[in-house]
Amino acid sequence: MWKVQLFKLNFDDAEPNAVEEVVRSGWITMGEKTKEFESQFAELLGSDAKVAAVSNGTAALHMALLALGVGPGDEVIIPSLTFVADINTVLLVGAKPVLADCTSFDDWNMDPADIEGKITPRTKAVMIVHYAGYPCNMDAIMDVCKRHGIKLVEDCAHAPGAKYKGRAVGTFGDIGCFSFFTNKNLSVGEGGAVSTTSVELDQEMRYLRSHGMTTLTLDRHKGRAISYDVVRPGLNYRIDEMRAALGIVQLAKLPGAHLSRERIVKRYIEGFKDIDGLMIPFVSHSGIEPVYHIFPTLLPAGMDRLKVIEVLKREGVQSSIHYPEFQEFTAFRGGKLEATPIAQEIAKRELTLPLYPTMTDEEVNIVIAAFRLALQEGR
């Protein structure tokens, strides 16, 4: 159906071979491959990061909030422009989500000034998102959190390996949360991780990941333990060995994939630079090393987005929206969510174009030509 899909897996023979090795080993639940993946991912982050692999990115967010003691009566400031997992996990621990706006139409990450303006005596934590793989203004956000004594959760679902002033995201806040969903830069199907530099928080999240148990099934299988204690209520948010093995292969490909994504993004920017009214965020940012998870655009004001999507589809190019506004979802209507004018305007005009590291020059050319045509017909 598509000449150019929104996303394609960066897989070759290495991934199925890694999975086959695990299956033939006779041990498929969380074990030695998971430990290896966690160790390698911690090396990617640096800064003495401690990493626990989990079942998915939403599990990581849920665990982070539980580990930080967020619960009923608390407020958590979250981005207005983000995936629904952020607001869902806040609500599921019984806290109140408070929406903060984007910084500008050029910087779609959370506005540090708006974060500070939303703080109340009930604010327990701030949850930031490094949108599209572009790091937030961490100096300003960390300053706000430190001055107000507020915990910081980094949602790094878009940004494994991204850096702010030379330091990897996921190591600034109290806890970093990663997603390895199919369309992410590091793809294992379902999977995620939590990171922290705190020994205490690392142990707490490992308890939360596996029923609050003091030893793992692998330890008993290997004869390293006979029984176990349960030291706190926990969940089953464990990853399995097949996905950990995929993660190891994908980690090795990540640096090259990031370079490919950067090259494609630069071609897009050059191909669209003369289009009146079209805006591409984060183009002028410095001091950061992004990882280009998606290619978001802000359509010209008054553009018929549905028409643009239809023309792209006709031309064989898949597109998407990142993200619809929370205020429009059935689950949150009447919930008195904060007005966030910039984010809500972006949500109405945003359109995401295909981006994946194996895109060919021909595919990039097809997207550029189709998008230019779609904008002409959508005016």
Image: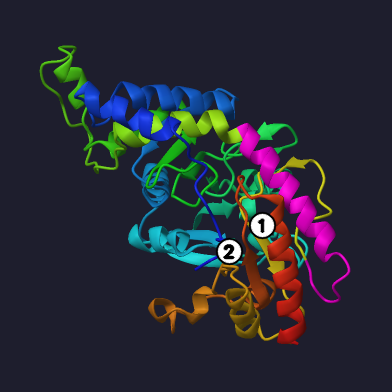
Residue 81 location, quadrant: bottom right
Q: Residue at x 57, y 49 (%)?
A: 158
Q: Residue at x 79, y 72 (%)?
A: 278
Q: Which residues are magenta?
A: 255-279
Question: Does residue 65 appear to the left or right of 254 in the view shown?
Answer: left
Q: Residue at x 32, y 21 (%)?
A: 32
User: Which residue in the structure is indicated by mark 2?
Assistant: 3
Q: Nearer the viewer, residue 107 or 212?
A: 107
Question: Does residue 278 appear to the left or right of 138 in the view shown?
Answer: right
Give percent across and percent down for residue 177: 48, 44
Residue 358 location, quadrant: top right
Say if the magenta span includes residue 202.
no
User: Which residue in the structure is indicated by mark 1?
Assistant: 363
The correct choice, above or below, for 49 with respect to 301 in the image is above
The correct choice, above or below, for 206 with respect to 377 in the image is above
Q: Residue at x 62, y 39 (%)?
A: 257
Circle 2 — which element?
loop
Circle 1 — which element?
helix
